[in-house]
Structures are given as structure tokens and as C-alpha cells.
Image: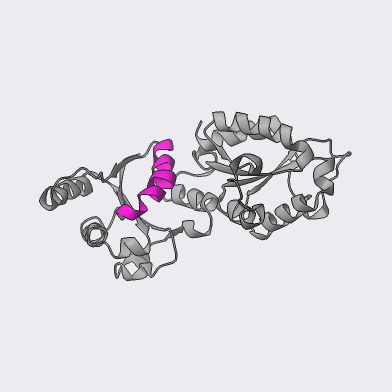
Amino acid sequence: MGKAFISHSSRDRGFVEREILPLLHGNNINTWYASDDIDSASQWEREIRFALEACDSLAVTLTGSALASPWVKAEVDWWLEERRDCLFVPVIVEACDWKSLHLLIRNYQAVDFSQGSYDAKRQFLRAWGIEGKEQRGLVRSVFPCYAREDTAEVLRWKMGAEIGGVDVFVDVMSLRAGESWEDRWKEEIEKRDLFCLFWSEAASKSARVREEWEFALSLDRPDFIKPIPIAQPHEAPPPKALRHLHFGNSNRLMIDLLSRSGQ
């Protein structure tokens, strides 16, 4: 699949290591990613030049820090002058004036991670011609929505998912002492790759569960909500707003989840 150069500000290292590198490596795309152990500016310039010449694609993370980085600008300038016919993927990480980085950058399709990562990951991989079920590493984190009565079932499911390398946010285990759930739940839903709705009779009667799935639905993200039925459909019929979703087998969903996590 070739080799991708990752142009980024050192302040964006966390995003690159969390989102970009696992996604590319999980889909058999090698990367060149600058390390911190290059001793001098002249050595840095040589390393960067050699790396750019060895790569056939470049992804640049776009943040305020990246726009202020002379190295990011130099890398993008070189690529759009010397490798204009090769793949160039702008990656929007946060709201910024990214079109100011280079005059030609507006001619390329940007991938926007600032509005949620799942759909952005799909679009990002499509830039390398990786489509549909061939895409790996899409699901790295999950928000489980459930009624308190179903906590034990959710915790068992969480163990299986985490064996496969998927981060599962469960409030009873993830909140710090004194932290309010009301201050966190919308933020957690928005930043997760998947919203897993554990559906049972108790869940169908829970005001909190309804509030969470209504918010997830309002995000209008394709394939974001995945129902996991604990009860039979006749015992807990799904509400009208969710009837377009498939309330299938929970074991089947686990297999699908692990395949999309790259395991």
C-alpha cells in the first residue's frame, strides 16, 4: 500500500498516535512519522527530505499549532511542488484557518475529524482506495447506553470488547470521584466511534436511556447507533424512532465490532 508521510505539529502528537497511525497501520499502510530524537536542525532537514522523497502519500494534520509550524509549512510546500500528482490528504483536527496554509490546499478534499472520528476514518481510508468491509480500525471506542438494571450484562460485554482492543466508556468505572455525569455524557457520546444501545424492558422505561439515544440520534451520524438486544423484541418493542435500526444478535455485533477494530 506504499508509505505515507505524516506532517504534524509536535503538539498534535497525541491525535496522530491515537487516530492516524493505528488506522493506517491497521490497513497495511506504512508511515513515516517524525521522532523527537533528531539532534540538530540540519539533521532534521536531511531526515525530512529523505522521508518525503521515500513516501508516495502525505497526510497533514490541520490545527492552530500546525499552521504556526514552519516545518509543517515547508513539508506541505515541498509536497505540493514536487509530488503534486501523488496523494495529499488534509486532516482537519480543530477549527482553524487551514486554507491559509498553502494556496493550492483548497483544491484537495479535506477529511474533518473535528466533527467526530468514525465517519472521518471511513473517508480518510477511502483516500487510499480502501472501501467498505475492507476498512479496518474504524472502531476504537464505544459508548454503551443502558439501564442501571442491566449493568452486569454491560460489564460482561465490556470485558469482551476490551480484549479486542476497543475502549468502552462505562460511567460507573470511568468517572473520577466527585465528577458529575451530567457534565460528561454528551461529550463522551460525541467523541466515540460507536453508540451501543443495550435494549431491555428496563431500558425501554428509562428516561436517562431515552435522553442518551435521542441525543445520539440527533447527531445524524450513519451507522453510529448499534442496538444490542438483551430482551426479546416482543418483551421490549423498540420505539418508533429506532425501528429503522436492526435489533440483531449481540454476539454477531461483537464479531462485527472486533472486525472493524482491526482485531
Number of numbered discs: 0
Left or right, residue 112 beside residue 183: left
Q: How is the image coloured?
A: one colour
Q: Give the percent coordinates (x, y) of residue 27.
A: 43, 38
Q: Residue furthest right?
A: 234
Q: Main secondary structure of the magenta part?
A: helix
- Relative image position of residue 171 (x, y in whole percent): 64, 44
Residue in the image at 76% along x and 52% along y: 208
Q: Which of the 4 image quarters holds residue 161?
A: top right
Q: Is residue 178 above or below residue 76?
A: above
- Specify whether residue 167 is in view: yes
Above/below status of 152 relative to 65: above
Q: Position of residue 16 (x, y in %)?
A: 38, 48
Q: Determine the residue positioned at 47% across, 56% down.
A: 113
Hey, which residue is sitting farthest left in the picture? 42
Between residue 236 and residue 128, name the one nearer to us.
236
Quarter location, residue 146: top right
Q: Quadrant of the N terminus?
A: top left
Specify the farthest residue to the front.
Answer: 178
- Magenta region includes residue 252: no
User: Was residue 13 drawn as part of the magenta stretch in this picture?
Assistant: yes
Residue 226, by quadrant, is: top right
The residue lying at 61 percent from left, 50 percent from top is 178
Residue at horizontal 13%, vertical 49%?
40
In terms of depth relative to the viewer, which is nearer, 4 or 205? 205
Q: Is residue 25 depicted above or below 84 in this figure?
A: above
Q: Is residue 64 left or right of residue 159?
A: left
Give the residues drawn in magenta, as a range: 10-27
Across and down, in percent, residue 236 comes to 86, 42
